[in-house]
Amino acid sequence: MIKPLPVTVIGGYLGAGKTSLVNHLLRNADGLRLAVLVNEFGALPIDEDLIEAQEDDIISIAGGCVCCSYGSDMAAALSDLRKLDPAPDHVVLEASGVALPGAIAGSVGLMQGYSMDGVVIVADAETLRTNANHKYMGDTVTRQLADADIVVLNKVDLVDDKTRADSTDFALSYAKNAQLLGAEHGALPPEVLLQSFVGRNRDSGARHDTSGFDSVSLPLETPCDPAALGRFLASDELDLVRAKGFVRDESGAVHAVQSVSRRWSSEPAPEDSPIGLVCIGLKPAFDEEKLRQQIAQAFG
Amino acid sequence: MSQTTIYSARKIITMNPNQPEVSHVAVREGRVLGAGSLEELAVWGDYELDERFADKVLMPGFVEGHAHTMEGTMWRNVYCGFFDRMDPNGKVWEGVKSIDAMLERLKQAEADLDDPKAPLPGWQLDPIYMDNALVSRADLDTVSETRAIGVLHASGHIMNVNTKGLELAGLMKTGINHPGIPLGPDGYPTGELRGPDAYMPVGEHVGFDRDVLGCDADGLRDFGKLCVRTGTTTITDLAARLNDEAVEMMLDVTSEKDFPSRIVPLRHFMGLTPEELIDHAKELKEKSTDQLRLGMIKVVADGSIQGFSARMRWPGYHNGADNGLWYITPDHLSQILNLALENDLHIHTHTNGDQATELVLETMEEALRNHPSPDHRYTLQHCQLADAAQFRKIKQLGMCVNLFANHHFYWGDEHYNLTVGPERALRMNACRTALNTGVPMAIHSDAPVTPLGPLFTAWCAVNRLTASGRVQGEGEKIPVADALYAITIGAAYTLKLDGEVGSIEIGKKADFAVLEDDPTAVDPAELKDVKVWGTVQGGRIFAAADL
């Protein structure tokens, strides 16, 4: 069984901070091999100090990550990533400023050998409402929000509380299926943005005490229907940012289940995968005890 | 001294207002030495009188300002279009009028395939003329269950595939959740794939090239044959990626001694930063030859009207569909326009919806303030929905338009009923308004989207008939003379080639369309039926019958 390569689409209008978010991920890749696919327009998308080498169309980045441009043929660029040795662990696909990331996610979901992780839309807390009123691009901005699983409201350090609250309400009025996270310079814990980071380091819960997130690991030893679990993890009731884990179904087969906001998926996984679940939520609403109970009640 | 040949003809329509019609044209070194009477031309010295065209009508070779060389490669697929259409070998394929007829044609093609694994691609299906009949994978499975089959619609927006095609792409499964992939009652895809996002993953399995704009050497040669059959001697490839390999191929093929057309490929803007784009265009310009004119740039602002991806101004689509898609940001467009003006490079921009046109006009106005350019001839391609005010602006900015006259005939009814509604459908491809406003104008086929054929395109602009036979936009009709100008000098002007081609006059290329009838004498309703004997290109004679 070839493990599908997870793809996270990073979208949002020009200047929102997609590039700084991607660079932050690269700086905190922590041994994961990220392959960053960028659209061609604009300046070099990778901070110079991260670049180890550049040849032809591929930039080698510290820590085994790479960056390529996908120009006009995204599918071909994704296929090319499959040929890399060593293989990447996760693809971060930076969409162009005019792209509708939902359409990209739809395409990726149809490609063999890839799995859609989620759509992250970066919005500028300061200029979001202005951009959304742009004569030509306004509806593109709001349609991008509507595609989001996660909205990163960036540059919150540059606005007052009222503007932040306004932008948050505005973004969520379009991003109906998303969790909204505030950020400065696109800096967020990687496990919030990319499922491949979730549960890599089981102690990581403590690391982000100050970042507004909390996470909990649950054993989940009882066999269950992975699809039902996926749906539950993505439900309004739990209101999680992300969840990821491995469970056994009634027949004993192992499945990987993951969710990001209201999106979920499950797929068969290797027999030796570590059974258990990691859930990430937003503080202060995130209540570890309550979550344990809810999961135990439904799937214990 | 090189040899002079003087051709006599029943009539030579020169498009030179000083002598609109003459009886003879003298050719030397592939160029027009002169047009006039035999006596007038005899002063140039020794000549050979060639009377093979004595019963023909000569016009300047037609110039097609918006086509794609992939028309040459598309004919490797099974033609499933509703209308009769001629292939590069001159065979006229009868239009298929029903789904059953399409299946029958695919079965015939299937029977001719030796390789049991070879895919079977079809093209140009248009169910809007068949009461929007749906094609299921089960229908296509009756053609073959063992080889992948895919039929691309004329709109370019939908592909129908069989079960094998879905299997090869890994889509023959339940649980697919994609807006472009309808599912049957059994939970499996029906085989209809709506939108490029949905059909691209299957396309390569059913025989469509990943690079849809791609064309190989044989495809280009076939494209050349279509040019001869339609009287076309200069034609664009709008647009291509033009990597080194493709440019080498085009240089080789266009320099073959019997290659019959002058190709003008435009570099597609995607895949490069604006700076890289400009550098590449400059580099390409240096490689230009007489038969391959490189160095122009194509920018795409929005999508298509029939695909609901064109960008519309208020009140948007007639049926309430969401507004279309931008393929470029205002910043990106602005950078490219500014850099290109600064570097004296020539840009054509695709805009279908009136909002896309507006963005380009606004951005262009600003760029021109930064880089005043007295003769840029930047051209709006398609520009289908521009209103009168936009045409006035286009004129003021010194821009040109290349209007999609053929679109009326093929999609006019669809636009009237569904996409833009009656009022805007009347003003689509407003040739009369363009000319009244003094905007330099060409008209085009966008082959292979619609068939290459400048006389057909002229007929569309003159008659404005839709496929159902309605006149749509009486007020935007233009006279035959204006339409003939548009497919010769008009198109040449948009390419800055009007000093070399587009009329039969002294010093210009000896490029002629050789016609069996006089397009200025036939009933305008029959303009499209004027037979093309072949062409003369750079003084070389190409008879369609001998290709």
Image (spheres, coloured by chain):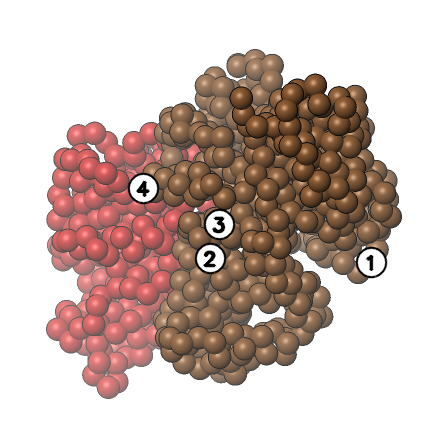
The residue pinned by badge 1 equals B469
User: Considering only order in the chain, which callout, 3 or 1, is on the residue closer to the N terminus?
Assistant: 3
Look at the image and tell me whether residue B48 can be seen.
yes
Judge the density around disc 4: few (<14), some (14-19), many (≥20) Cα neighbours within 10 Å.
many
| Tag 2 and tag 1, C-beta contact below 8 Å | no
Q: Do labels 3 and 2 share a chain?
A: yes
Q: Are marks 2 and 4 on the same chain?
A: no
Depth check, mark 4 against mark 1: the one in front is: 1
Chain B, colour shown: brown
The residue pinned by badge 2 equals B197
**Residue A69, disc:** 4
Chain A, colour shown: red
Describe the element under mark 4 as helix, strand or loop.
strand
The residue pinned by badge 3 equals B221
Q: What residue type is labelled 1?
A: Gly
Say which quarter of the image contains residue A242: bottom left
Q: Mark 2 lies on which chain?
A: B
Q: Which amino acid does label 4 sit on?
A: Ser
| Tag 2 and tag 4, C-beta contact below 8 Å | no
